[in-house]
Image (cartoon, helix red, strand yellow):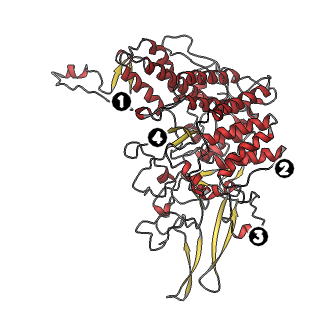
Amino acid sequence: MRNNLIKIKHFLPFLLLIGMAACNKDFLEKKPLDAYSDLDVWNDPNLVQSFVNDMYNQMRHGYNEVMLSSMTDESRFIHNYGTTQSVSGAMSPDDLGALNLFGEWNKHYSAIRNTNLFFEKIAAVPFKDEALRTRLRGEAHFMRAYFYHMLVKYWGGVPLITKTFGLKDKDMLLPRNSFEECVKFISDECDSAITLLPAVQSGANKGRATKYAAMALKSRILLYAASDLFNRPAPADPSYGYVGGDRVARWTLARNAAKAIIDSNKFDIYKPSADPVENYTRVFMDKDNIEAIFVKYFNRELLGTDHDKYNGPNGYHNWGGNVPLENFVEGYQMADGTPFSWTNPTMAAQPYVGRDPRFYATILYDGAPWKKRATDGIDFDPIGKVQTGRYEIWNAAKNAMELRNGLDTRQSSLENWNGTYTGYYIRKFMDINLDAQFFRGDKPWQFFRYAEIVLNYAEACIALGLEDEARTYINKVRTRAGMPALTAATTGQALVDQYRYERRYELAYEEHRYFDARRWLIATTVFTGPAKAIDIYAKLNPDRVTQTFIYTVLSADVQQRSFLDRHYLLPIPSDEMRRDNLLKQNPGYPIN
């Protein structure tokens, strides 16, 4: 317990009064210089605000070295770090593998404890500005809702704790609340935040939660709650999902929550140019664009993001990281809306020509235009194009054909490590003007953006039989991407399939696919099987100048994936089960 001393390490203007120690005893009795007592914090509005600031740091953004996409059919993390365990079926209550980095049961409950402590203390803080107290209360309600939504979407129903515990408290061991109770609690917390928070945070408050951030969180949790995963027939325990009730009412709540944001007219689909590739790219590059609802900002000098270094090609002296799977790449439609197929000879001969414009803003493929090379690579690639294949080249001086490996392969002449296993790298979120080998980026991470809300609304409309309305809103996102609008002929299951396509590729790598595949109950299919790659061989033509590219999809010996029915909910960690004997484990996992 941290009731006696609360360390505040972020955003705090430490005022350190350092005096000469008369003796060792005096020195040892001094209060730690990076710590404040309860009395210090809760008697000083500035320290209270710093305490709330620290809660924002506990909200995990997506620009980390291991991306959640690598636990899905979007990508593979080449350095492992437990990702193989998470995707191979070896995950257990004793070790969630890389998913330990995402669900973070302990971390989220620690953050929730801080919000509870805030609510216990805030009334007595001597604020001169009551508007500040109100705003901070709103932010704390939003963050408590956010941290609980993180737990619920991984585990289902969890213990709802709304007070702090001391070592002598006898009621600190709690059973899981029902999933329904958890969803209602999160929704109610969002409502509280909505009433207390301003519509805009500006100046020094930029980046804090707004009423629209709380509305977006409510939209997301209600959409998840209405989905198949949590509405399966007769769950064994109400912790795992709803037991009966009115599912139409749940879809209606989800629809209304999304529509409330749409009707505010505060946001729109961002289209700064006539080029759909540029438009989609700039959604994630342009700060404060009209699509952003709630983002995390980065200061390049202080708290910049290493996303570009983590994921850039090894031929640019970056780390490879989370590399797109062929499973994901081959799913991109053609620009006319027809499916891509390797069995189509024309498509197979030029697989990267004429695809959905979002493909070019999301994937670095062999031959994709990219950055100028560093000095040690520019002689091999003066243009700056991604090289993930093997190329036959005529050496006139030797009067012989040579085989060269691409600069961005695992056989690169620049770096033969950190190379892709799949033939691709991520383009999305990457700043083409940044030298990621030496500098950090400052593009924001978008926790919530308007395109998600529009798609949330469309999904709820489909579930309620409002197909015309659903198509209208799907097309708002689809046409921004330069794709043809869906027509009235797209109905029934075809409309569901097109919606799921749109959500998959519009929200790619934004930490949605893992939850979408689970809540649609398709993860046992799409997350199972080989993580496929592409082999690219450029055969020299008789003219000794041009090449014919041969593309081979690799399914064997890449990475075998397995997602079992029990994985639709994560196992509660064993140490938590041992600590609280009132907890019930999720179905299918051993009870230690």
**Distance Cα–Cα, label 4 vs label 1:** 17 Å
Q: How would you rate the neighbour count of disc 4 (Cα within 10 Å): few for under 14, some for 14-19, many for 20 or more?
A: some
Q: Amino acid at mark 1?
A: Leu
Give the residue drawn at x 43%, y 29%: 53
Q: Quick check: 582 left or right of 137?
A: right
**Distance Cα–Cα, label 2 vs label 1:** 58 Å
Note whether residue 224 is visible.
no
Q: How would you rate the neighbour count of disc 2 (Cα within 10 Å): few for under 14, some for 14-19, many for 20 or more?
A: few
> Does dot 1 land on a helix, a strand or a loop?
loop
Q: Amino acid at mark 4?
A: Tyr
Mark 2 vs mark 4, foreground winner is 2
Looking at the picture, tell me which residue is in the foreground, 77 or 437. Answer: 437
- Which quarter of the image is occupied by the C terminus? top right
* Location of mark 3 (residue): 345
Q: Amino acid at mark 2?
A: Ala
Find residue 36 and report its image quarter.
top left
Give the residue drawn at x 50%, y 15%: 165
**Distance Cα–Cα, label 1 vs label 3:** 61 Å
**First reached walking from the N terminus: tag 2 or tag 4:** 4
Q: Amino acid at mark 3?
A: Pro
**First reached walking from the N terminus: tag 4 or tag 1:** 1
* Location of mark 1 (residue): 12
Looking at the picture, tell me which residue is in the foreground, 383 or 571. Answer: 383
Mark 2 vs mark 1, foreground winner is 2
**Distance Cα–Cα, label 3 vs label 2:** 28 Å
**Distance Cα–Cα, label 4 vs label 3:** 46 Å
> Does dot 3 land on a helix, a strand or a loop?
helix
Image location of residue 245, percent across then percent down:
79, 22
**First reached walking from the N terminus: tag 2 or tag 1:** 1
The dot on residue 297 is: 4
* Location of mark 2 (residue): 489
